[in-house]
Amino acid sequence: MTMRTFPILVIAVFLFACGTMDVAPVQPVARIAVGDEGPARPVLSKKTTPKDRPAFREGIPGESEPAPGHALWSRRFGGVGSNMGVSIAATPDGGMYVLGQFSQTMDIGPATTHKSAGLEDVFLMKLDREGDPLWSRSFGGKSHDYADHVVVDASGDVFITGSFMEKIDFGGKTHRCRGVHDVFVAKLDGDGNYLWSRAYGDGQDQICLRPLPSGDGGVFLAGYFRGVVNLGGKPHRSYPDKAAFVGRLDAGGKRVWSEQFGHIFDYAMPGLAHAANGDLIYGGGSDPTVEFTGKRMKRIDRMADLGVVVARYDTSGKRMWRKRFGSGSDNLHTEVALGPYGDIVVAGSFGGTVNFGGEEIKSGSMSDIYVAALDPEGRHLWSRNFGGGRYQYLSGLAVDGEGNTYIAGQFMGGNIDFGGEPLVSETSNDGAFMAKLDGAGAHVWSRSFEGGSLRFPGGIALDSGGDVLVCGSFSDWIDLGNGPLVSAGHHDVFVARIRH
């Protein structure tokens, strides 16, 4: 899920609200003493060794691997300012890309330090399968530059998205912002070299952009905006507040097709998934606009009647079907993924009620988490909701080749129950969680990650071995199950490989 500096402020007001994440048995919570006896000095990273590994099974001798849900390794990257891990993607060679943003400095390994050109810059780093840096890049101007998502195509090329406020250059063209925020998409090769980039926006506010490789060297894009967005064809105009859009660019960055539809809630990041036959699956929050209700509604009515939209498009951009589920007060983040038999898994955060075709599920707090499975035609297979605290927020979803679902996110003000032993945040701060559900949505394992201050998973992905790659940000310290990492600045980036 897109994480930026301003969503953190929004979180403090109502919910940790922006947020990819691409779709992961009960273990004791990993923790260390809280107080004056915390870790004494910052560490760059923590690797497991044969000597360390018995501790993963609570001291049981003879165990050579960490328990499911615990880190095989974890890493810290940071500097003197605020460093945010926003999105992670697995590479074909077993490594990973991590995308984020930073202020002041970003230390990536002992010999590489990036300095921000302004308030925040965007960084991209490539790590090997053990989490060691291979290369890194930074991009930005003198104002605010924010990261959204990173994805990798089959050839190893990488797409990154985000937004900027003044200007930004990825190595081939300088883009200048024409409003409050413009959005960007850039394509780089596997060594970080520039291939092409595009920026979209007008004098108003364009916030988020979600990419997904289209399989032919191009990319699908989805996002929301106020004002005008033009991918290269007919301009899309918001009405009356914000609107969502989805489209496709070819291998050279030119528009193939695009369309827009209604959307209302700030920071409601959409999700995209690619079916085996090339179809695109879209999921996102939406208001009941004219295409669903037959009439326009007043803003106050729309705010009380938000829903989840799931849609399917063929390779030419023809909409095959679109369905809207639920009516509630919040709809903050949506993720979608494809199961091994073409089933669609959709997950997100919601307040109020939602019904995917089974029993109606109702939020018991400001925001709960839902996970639902639909068949290829959008018909209900199963649905679940999880809550218990003041709010629960989803930030990542992944589905493996056996149909197991992995979710990650954050919860506050109590506990969260996935069907095993409830997870409890034992500090005054938010708790981060990860859970694995089977192909019918039943609990396999779940666990929480403790720390001394705000932590949040910035996204999850599955590697070729089925383990979970996760990135995020933390201050003070965080323990992912293989020992504490300690921040050097306001917030640092963590990256980890979690045993499936």
Image (cartoon, rainbow, N blue to C red):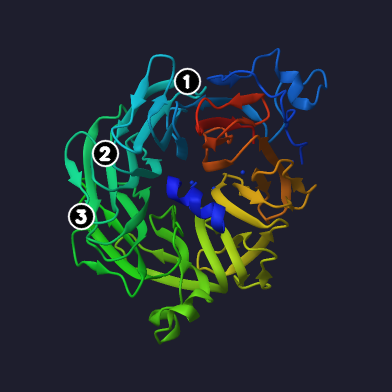
Which residue position is annotated with label 3? 178
Q: Residue at x 56, y 19 (%)?
A: 43
Q: Nearer the viewer, residue 5 or 269?
A: 5
Which structural element holds mark 1? Answer: loop
Which residue position is annotated with label 1? 132
Q: Residue at x 71, y 12 (%)?
A: 51
From the viewer's perspective, is residue 95 above or below residue 158?
Answer: above
Choose the circle earlier in sequence order: 3 or 1.
1
Q: Position of residue 198 (x, y in %)?
A: 22, 48
Choose the circle earlier in sequence order: 2 or 1.
1
Choose the circle earlier in sequence order: 3 or 2.
2
Q: Position of residue 378 (x, y in %)?
A: 52, 68
User: What is the residue that sits farthest to the left in this orientation?
Assistant: 173
Which structural element holds mark 2? Answer: loop
Q: Nearer the viewer, residue 193 or 494?
A: 494
Q: Amino acid at mark 1?
A: Asp
Q: Is residue 1 visible?
A: no
Along the horizontal axis of the image, is 230 left or right of 208? left
The quadrant of the image that shows the C terminus is top right
Q: Amino acid at mark 2?
A: Lys
User: What is the residue that sits farthest to the top in this orientation?
Assistant: 51
User: What is the residue that sits farthest to the bottom in this orientation?
Assistant: 295
